[in-house]
Image (cartoon, grey):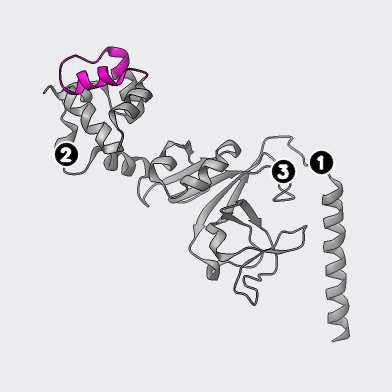
Amino acid sequence: MSTVCRNLKYLRKQKGWTQQEFADRLNIKRSLLGAYEEERAEPRTEVLEQVSDMFRVSIDDLLRRDLSSQKETFLERRRQQKLGGQSRQNVVFVPVKAAAGYLAGFNDEEFIEELNTFTLPMLGAGNYRAFEIAGDSMLPTPSGSVVVCHKVDGWDDIRNNEAYIVVTNRGHRIQTGSEKQPFQDQGDPVVRQSLYDPYSVNMEEVLEIWQADAVIQKMGQQHKMSVNHLAGMVNQLQEQVSMLKKQMKN
């Protein structure tokens, strides 16, 4: 078997794809892929270019280098190079259009590595998530902004006066409360938003917790005051006045 044929079969199996699944991604017939893997035909240049882009490996390596001979699997080595361990910075961007897919693939390394990544000079080394915000879920941060976060291990690590993105199996939830109330009597966490009443979330619904480190928004991007926004501000002011009255009485 030629090197390129061995590499095609190796890369397909590393991904766990059937011949039909790999052929569909390459826009060729399954029988043709089978012919490639069995060395009954030589892959065309356009096929090699697709495989090169798909697996981020040079065509020269596909043709000349036996990828299966490495002590560490090729895909694992590429993943480590991309993530860079803790010595480098890696920010994975989750756009609104990928939100539904993220809920299903947040713990899938292959799904995560398909998302776009970037770096920011003000952040240190480590792995981050950047969530695009839609609607008024994180006021006063305007819709369309990108919130860059680092992973929080659990509710015990949540601090007052910090903003958090709580990813649940219902969607992304925002916690921006100034007063931490992580648990109710039932043991369920409370998600508190700055302009809205807090609401409980079942522990079984919580998938991840991310603490906000930075907000990215377009120049000139402004948030338009909505009726709900104004009502929330009034409610917040009323709560603060009530708290002051109680303190004065004491």
Callout 2, which amino acid? Answer: Gln
Q: Is residue 32 magenta?
A: yes
Which element carries disc 2, helix, strand or loop? loop
Callout 1, which amino acid? Answer: Lys
Answer with mark 3 or mark 1, whichever residue precedes in sequence: 3
Q: Which residue is mark 3?
A: 135
Q: Gap between marks 1 and 2, in whole Å?
A: 56 Å
Answer with mark 1 or mark 2, whichever residue precedes in sequence: 2
Q: Residues within 10 Å of mark 3 (few under 14, many from 20)?
A: few
Which element carries disc 3, helix, strand or loop? loop
Q: Position of residue 14 (x, y in %)?
A: 26, 38
> Which image quadrant is residue 165 in?
bottom right
Callout 3, which amino acid? Answer: Gly
Which quadrant of the figure contains the C terminus?
Answer: bottom right
Q: Residues within 10 Å of mark 1 (few under 14, many from 20)?
A: few
- Circle 3 or circle 1, nearest the eye: 3
Asked whether residue 121 is in view, the answer is no
Give the residues in magenta: 27-47
Relative to 239, residue 60 above or below: above
Q: Which residue is mark 1?
A: 224
Dot label at residue 70: 2
